[in-house]
Image (cartoon, rainbow, N blue to C red):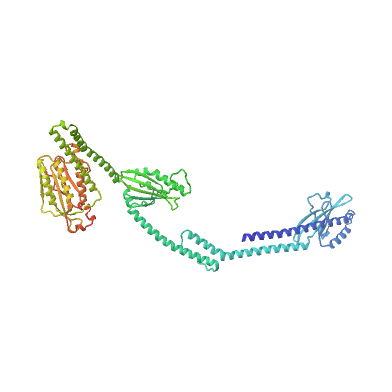
Amino acid sequence: MAGATLAVSLFMSGLTFWAVNSIQQEAQLNDTRFGRDLGLLLASNVTHLIAEDNLTDVARFSSRFYQSTSSIRYMIYADQEGKIFFGIPYSAAEVQNSLTIERRIQLPETEIKQASLPLVRQHHSPNGDVTDVFVPLRYENRYLGILAIGINPNPTVVNSSNLTRDVTIAVFVAIWAMVILGAVFNALTITRPIKELLVGVKNIAAGNFQQRINLPFGGELGELIFSFNEMAERLERYEEQNIEELTAEKAKLETLVSTIVDGAILLDNNLQLLLVNPRARRMFGWEGREVIGVNVLELLPTELSFELSEPLQEMARKGALEDKGVQNPSDPISEPSEGQQGSSTGEFRITLTQPTQRIVRILLTQVFDQQRSTVKGIAMTVQDITREVELNAAKSQFISNVSHELRTPLFNIKSFIETLSEFGEDLTEEERKEFLETANHETDRLTRLVNDVLDLSRLESSKIYHLDRVDLSQVIEQILRTHQLNAKDKELELSYQPEGNLSPVLGHYDLLLQVMTNLVGNSLKFTEPGGKIVLRAYHVRGDSSNPIHQDKIRVEISDTGIGIDPEDQEAIFSRFFRVENRVHTLEGTGLGLSIVKNIINKHHSHIYLVSEVGVGTTFWFDLAVYQDHCSTLDSSQQSEKLTDDFEINPTGLLF
């Protein structure tokens, strides 16, 4: 509005001044014509008088002429040198005083002696622009001097021009005074609340929903302020609700992430940690350290940091380019596909040596925004697959061993049967009988192997065995009856040394019978004739105040056999591991002790051994004493901690 007012006022003022100047120029033109004509007329009447040096008539004629009109301001006569010799309203006394000061007229720069027409110029005076007319005086081609006449401006034109100019200036000043007053009024009534609204809107946009405007205005402006305050109040309520919901969702997310079995790490596009779950902290030894905001490459183990440095930086670089709106058409992960649900992934498998030897699988996933257009970070999933790799290796080894163990008896059975089938008539009765016994023996061996594999598979499955009251004395007595005859055949002494009356144990009768059978069978197999095999069972006292630390029954099987090398004692319970594989003396499936270990684990206990090569071996394990409330105990109370909290103190070897 101020700009429009300024433009209009300047245009009108300029138009007014242009009109005034036009009028003044027209008046000056008229004054110039009047002065020129008047000068020529006057010069034609006084030239001959000046030539005759009749200054009295010149003065008389000029005075009458000067007094007859008010348009003439002055009349000055000067000689050839420019020296004034007569002038009106000047007198001789004014022209030359007692000091003999001479006055000269200032002539125009143009050579006036050769001028044929009067010369005209204007000079400014307090009463307006005066028109000066210089008329050369010539008589009979003789230059006599010059006549200068001053023509006053038209007073009517001057007064009207001055009045117009004054009115224009007054109007201009009045307009701007009104503009200034309007601006002040606008600032007090409109601009201030608009500025307050602008500040309020900026604060709302910045997230300050507590912003309010308190100005006493009515009308439409008051309704606008009221609506703004109501909007801010609603936004504040919505923010509080959203914060509560976000806090709850964040708590749920943190709880969920903290319970994840795998390590979870969230990075920003600068590879700085935003979120780490407890599992990842334990895996990398970050407990008690402030790692949030630190570059992940500075925290990871050396081999892991070296392996992931390039892919992480590449994913972060692409994410930064997408944040800036730069798209790389050749980038395979710059545009997320539908199947990826807005993410790009990479998988790495790395073997770590620190803090412990283990194998981890790293999954890198780009995290996109809701529109799947901007990368917001990188998610790292860390999986400890050491057990998985070991199980896969064990599975492969198991399959290889089973195949090898099955192939040998099958090959022997097939060989002897083919021999009997093709050359039976050429063999003696004793040879045929020997071949059939060998085939029968290999069939029994094959049956035992298949049964052991099935037993081991069943034990390693998730099948739940119901543990109940078992009289351990009956199990041991059945073992003695079963193996006593075999022991005598091998000239071995098999005995049982109980220590008092044994309490019933919590267990599974058939499984415990299989444990004792395998352990006693191994002792019979690896003990030389004349040796001893002793079974013991005795109480181990626990803490009566703690149901977890209850009384136990310890069972020991000792022999004076060949013993087990220290380097083999760790692997003796592995599947298909056999000491005779090295000495090549005895046969077996190599699954017996693995089955024993799994059965004892089903009873929430461990099996231990003490052995010395050439002296003998002792195996022992603990079983919980059966109590009436055992059936109501939670399975977590029957954990492996039961046996770990008791003193492992077997009676010792038989030497």
Give the x, y percent position of residue 525: 15, 41
Q: Nearer the viewer, residue 306 or 128?
A: 306
Q: Position of residue 192 (x, y in %)?
A: 54, 64
Spot the residue most to the front. 425
Q: Give the total of numbered labels.
A: 0
| Quadrant in the picture for the C terminus | top left
Say which residue appears at 43% left-offset and 45% top-offset: 333
Would you say residue 98 is visible in this rendering?
Answer: no
Lateral position of residue 40 relative to residue 317, left or right:
right
Pick whichever, 490 or 324, lies toward us.
490
Tell me if residue 168 comes above or below residue 114 in the rendering: below
**Which quadrant would residue 637 be assigned to in this image?**
bottom left
Quadrant of the rendering where the N terminus is positioned: bottom right
Q: Position of residue 344 (x, y in %)?
A: 41, 47
Residue in front for this viewpoint, 197 or 350 = 350
Residue at x 86% of width, y 56% of height: 41
User: Can the viewer see residue 3 in this picture?
Assistant: yes
Q: Quadrant of residue 560?
A: top left
Res 158 quadrant in image = bottom right
In percent of width and height, residue 230 lies at 48, 65
In the picture, measured across the screen, residue 16 lies left or right of residue 432, that is: right
Vertical position of residue 206 compared to residue 400: above or below: below
